[in-house]
Image (cartoon, grey):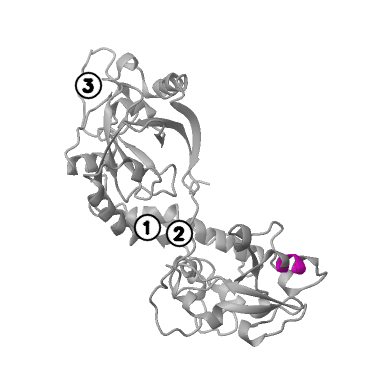
Amino acid sequence: EAWIGRSEGATVSFDVDGLAGEALEVYTTRIDTLFGATFIVIAPEHPLLEKMVTEEQWPDVEAYREKAKSKSDLARTDLAKDKSGVFSGAYAINPINGERMPIWVADYVLISYGTGVVMGVPGHDARDHEFAKTYNLPIPYVLKAHKDPTEEGSQTEQPLFKEHGVLIRSGKFNGMHSADALKAITEELAQHNQARASVHYKLRDWLFSRQRYWGEPFPIIWVKENDYQKLQALPQSPLKEFLPQEPVVFGTGEAKRYAVSLPMTALPLRLPEVESYLPSESGESPLANSTEWIEVALNLQTGETRPANEVKDPSEAWIYGRRETNTMPQWAGSCWYYLRYLDPQNANAIFDPKIEQYWGMPDFYIGGAEHAVLHLLYARFWHLFLYDQGIVSEPEPFKRLFHQGIILGEDG
């Protein structure tokens, strides 16, 4: 539950200066620091980016976006990496004080997490502080620690004050404690439709496909709607073993296709030998070049697959389809590698159950903080599925996680 990371905060709307009707939404748990927000950072993939970027800044932004495409989410959010960015030339308006805020593009912000936009509060956030120093952005302080009630003004402001405290330089909210200001500022902006209370989770969708040759192939065949209906009409078919209750559909109109999973008897699905690992001209995986492997005939009664060119005149039992050309990422194997270590030479099963029961699950997992909300979370999903299937004997994959810390981490 802690890994899923429920948090309560507010979603704030920042109008884009000079772009009528367009706004950037930011989720924050610290709206009490809004007076200290001096810049906005958006993900390189944000859909509004192309509308906002000035002609002068476009070459730099486009070059930065191309570099970001080659990085994984893990590399982009690595806590130890230097924070890079590029100015878009555009500005947002801070709804609490009307100040113009430069909009920067940075790859440490992910479009798949939250809104793909963050507000920079360099006086009260370590990452924002580092970014502001790198690009010479202003660093105001709008919070201070509690002052001693017997000594007026005795507390001096401290750089990078990250805790809750008393608001300063915050207009009519001066002197208010953070706990009260969180609600008061949200309510103030909500009256003007510029903020709303909201709940977010660290848990996020995990992009689980890659456009490359290596990696486990998905055992899925895409078929036409009328062929899918033929399968559904059959009282019994091996292909209905993993058929979802609600169809999985891709495309529209004439290009609309339905996903059919291969039965257990057709597994494991092995990659074909290919002459080139280079992507296809369409941007698809190199597998798209292997026509004989991709284009298949599928037997509705037996689940058998053959190359489409081997079934010239199909009967009612055969339909044509196309294999999924994306492959799984390297993360797929890392979700259960610790289990394979138990019995790595076993050619017939993931492991011998007696060996698994003897060794059990890892007692100690050492890894970075980013693992807790991505890799380990999904490894746990896989493990729980294997437990439900009776394959592993323990319900939890790891007994204890130890974060070893980061050299030159954000906290110094």
Between disc 3 and disc 1, the foreground one is 1
Indicate the quadrant where residue 16 lies: top left
Residue at mark 1: 74
Please name the residue that numbered disc 2 is placed on: 375
Is disc 2 in contact with disc 3, using a CB cutoff of under 8 Å?
no
Image position of 21 (left or right of 255): left
Residue 412: x and y, percent?
23, 46
Q: Determine contact: label 2, label 1, CB under 8 Å.
A: yes
Residue type at mark 2: give it. His
Mark 3–mark 1 Cα distance, whole angstroms, equals 40 Å
Residue at image point 34% right, 59% down: 69
Closer to the N terminus: mark 2 or mark 1? 1
In front: label 2 or label 3? 2
Callouts 3 and 1 close, C-beta under 8 Å: no
Residue hosting label 3: 155
Seen as rendered, the residue at the extreme left is: 136
User: At label 1, which amino acid type do we have?
Assistant: Leu
Q: Is residue 203 above or below residue 354?
A: above
Position of residue 76 relative to residue 288, above or below, is: above
Residue located 26% across and 44% down the image: 411
